Image (tube, rainbow, N blue to C red):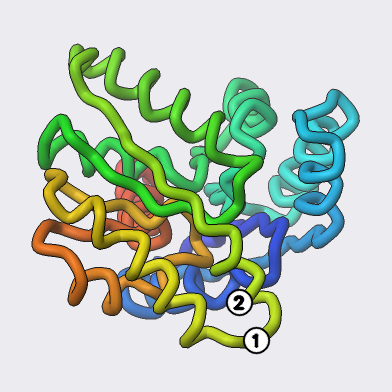
Amino acid sequence: MTHRVALIHAVTVAIAPVQVAFREIWPTADCIGLHDDSLSPDRERDQRLTDIMCRRVQALADYAMLAGAEGILFTCSAFGEAIDRVAKTAPAPVLKPNQAMFEAALALGDRIGMVATFAPSVASMQQEFRDIAGRAGRSEARIDVVCVPEAMAALKAGDDQAHNRRVAEAAVGLGSHDAVLLAHFSTARASRAVAAAVGCPVLTSPNSAVSRLRSLIDRAC
């Protein structure tokens, strides 16, 4: 049975990694993509998640539901509060980009490292991790984050190799943790380079999210 899934993007560089994850994990899914590439620069400009921005995120989710989506996956990590609002009223499963990855990381230990490349998203991601850990009774768990915005700059300039190298270099200092997370969908392309640089498990948000969304939709049917 084919299920329609909506992928809501705020940055172009997040699209290819989630497409790869679907091909590898859930190739029969009918994926529709909604892309507003003004959301991310507006978020960076405002330095906070405004009410207007939350309404724009809601409008994208509403359109996805009108298009027959049985589940929604957001692929940009800078809009957590807005996605939470969507999830409260949506008639189908809604996933934040890193939700499943954080839960998988907690299964590996309490000392988690993460490499990010988009600074405005870091604080909300750290809070999301703490919230998930708290609900799981794991208040002692912590996440140490290294942010390398120059890697994102290289990626936007079309230099994937420089992006992957910078992310892997940043990950080296986190190698003694129980797991290293690649914070954004866009950083998943560096997973092989990071795995070669550290001696612990490496988790990516698209793989974790696609697996979780498939499980949620299968259970609902």
Query: Cβ–Cβ below 8 Å for labels 1 and 2?
Result: yes
| Residue position marked by numbered label 1 in the rendering | 158
| Residue 110 x/y as whole percent | 15, 30
Front residue (pair 69, 21): 21
Observer able to see residue 149: yes
| Residue position marked by numbered label 2 in the rendering | 155
Number of numbered discs: 2
Observer able to see residue 220: no
Q: Secondary structure at mark 1?
A: loop
Task: Report whether 208 appears left or right of 127.
Answer: left
The quarter of the picture where the N terminus appears is: bottom left
The quarter of the picture where the C terminus appears is: top left
Q: Amino acid at mark 1?
A: Gly
- Residue in the image at 49% along x and 35% along y: 125
User: As displayed, is residue 25 above or below residue 158?
Assistant: above
| Residue 194 x/y as whole percent | 28, 70
- Residue in the image at 33% along x and 70% along y: 168
Q: Secondary structure at mark 2?
A: helix
Give me the C-alpha separation between circle 1 and circle 2: 5 Å
